[in-house]
Amino acid sequence: MARLNGWQRLWVVITGLWLVVAGGLAGIEIRRPAHAYLDLEGQQHLFLDGPPYPTSSPEVVIVDDAGGHYIFPPGTDTEKAAAVVRHLRNVTRAKVAMVLLVPPLILYVVGWLAGWVYRGFRRT
């Protein structure tokens, strides 16, 4: 197995630091409970004076694994509301994975390309 050169070791250290810091912040963000009024498309609405519908009917509240409360209009199908909440959580997790993995990969590719260009000038 080939040993890592200095630049690759630097990349490993920077990537490790990135994963610890960004991963910690992302973990905090994922576990923070959300409290939101949603429509059936999963669009969040901010209602400062309460929901825009009469609250005499019971609202549908879905509590996710992080303890977040997602509030849907009265009469919403519970299964459909639960599916919307699962979808929102999966999208959030996918975005966090992209934020954690893409920057180190871009850094590695840019570093490799810079080394390739440098080696090209050095030969002439």
Image (cartoon, grey):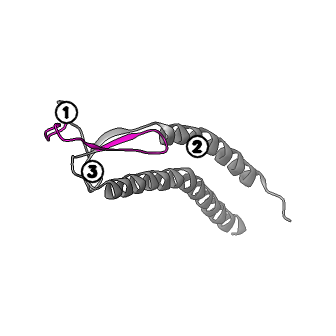
Does the magenta portion include 94? no
Task: Tell me if residue 20 comes above or below residue 98 in the rendering.
Answer: above
Report the disc number at residue 50: 1
- Where is residue 40, by image quadrant? bottom left
Tag 1 near tag 2, CB within 8 Å? no
Magenta stretch bounds: 50-71
Q: Name the residue under label 3.
A: 43
In the displayed image of the protein, which residue is found farthest to the right?
1
Question: How busy is the neighbourhood of tag 2: few (under 14 within 10 Å), some, or many (20 plus)?
Answer: some
Q: Name the residue under label 2.
A: 23
Q: Which of 111 and 86 is in front in this view?
A: 86
Q: Residue at x 73, y 54 (%)?
A: 8
The quarter of the picture where the C terminus appears is bottom right
Q: Which residue is drawn at 65% across and 65% down?
A: 116
| Cα distance between the residues tagged 1 and 3 | 16 Å
Which of pointers 1 and 2 lies earlier in the amino acid sequence?
2
Disc 3 marks which amino acid?
Gln
Name the magenta segment's main secondary structure: loop
Q: Position of residue 62 (x, y in %)?
A: 37, 45
Element class at badge 2: helix
In the displayed image of the protein, which residue is found farthest to the front?
57
In the displayed image of the protein, which residue is found farthest to the top?
49
| Cα distance between the residues tagged 2 and 3 | 26 Å
Element class at badge 1: loop
Task: Tell me if residue 35 comes above or below residue 104 in the rendering.
Answer: above
Report the disc number at residue 6: none
Give the side of residue 58 with respect to residue 81, left or right. left
